[in-house]
């Protein structure tokens, strides 16, 4: 089970986001072919641009469920 403490522990061994395996949004992005842009841009690209990644780095806990990589809130 994912806990608040599990965020921020992963290292950056490659270009993928270090939180990719724990991101609640990642499975949805992988399934949606129209969402490939998000995968390439944020998950596999410059993950420092991802609002979810920045939230975890800043707050040290899971981001709000509706926070999208571009910073918009999906409610």
Image (cartoon, rainbow, N blue to C red):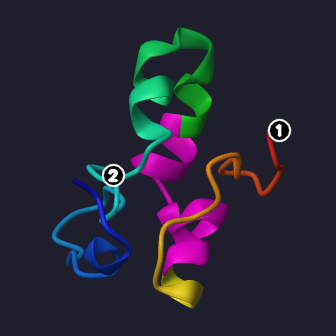
Residue situated furthest left in the rendering: 13
Is there any visible trace of residue 50 in the rendered image?
A: no
42 is within the stretch colored magenta: yes
Q: Is residue 13 above or below residue 30?
A: below
Q: Residue 60 vs residue 52: left or right?
A: left
User: Within 10 angstroms of label 2, few (less than 14), some, or many (20 or more) residues?
Assistant: some
Where disc 1 sits, the SS reads loop
64 is within the stretch colored magenta: no
Number of labelled discs? 2
Q: Position of residue 39 (x, y in %)?
A: 48, 37
Is there any visible trace of residue 11 in the rendered image?
A: yes
Q: Residue 61 vs residue 8: left or right?
A: right
Q: Position of residue 4 (x, y in %)?
A: 38, 74
| Sequence-first disc among 2 and 1 | 2
Residue at figure coordinates x 31%, y 67% from the top left: 3
Tell me the chief SS of the magenta region: helix
Q: Which mark is residue 60?
A: none
Which of 60 and 49 lies nearest the eye of the viewer? 60
Q: Which mark is residue 75?
A: 1
Q: Position of residue 13 (x, y in %)?
A: 16, 70
Query: Spatial distance from mark 2 to mark 1, Cα to Cα?
Result: 22 Å
Where disc 2 sits, the SS reads loop
* Magenta highlight range: 39-56
Residue at figure coordinates x 47%, y 77% from the top left: 61
Location of mark 2 (residue):
20
Residue at figure coordinates x 69%, y 47% from the top left: 68
> Which quadrant: the C terminus?
top right
């Amino acid at each position: 089970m994912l806990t608040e403490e599990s965020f921020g522990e992963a290292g950056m061994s490659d270009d993928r986001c270090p939180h990719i395996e724990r991101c609640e949004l990642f499975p949805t992005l992988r399934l949606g072919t129209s969402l490939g842009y998000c995968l390439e841009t944020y998950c596999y690209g410059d993950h420092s641009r991802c609002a979810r990644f920045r939230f975890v780095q800043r707050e040290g806990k899971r981001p709000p469920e509706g926070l999208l990589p571009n910073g918009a809130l999906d409610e």
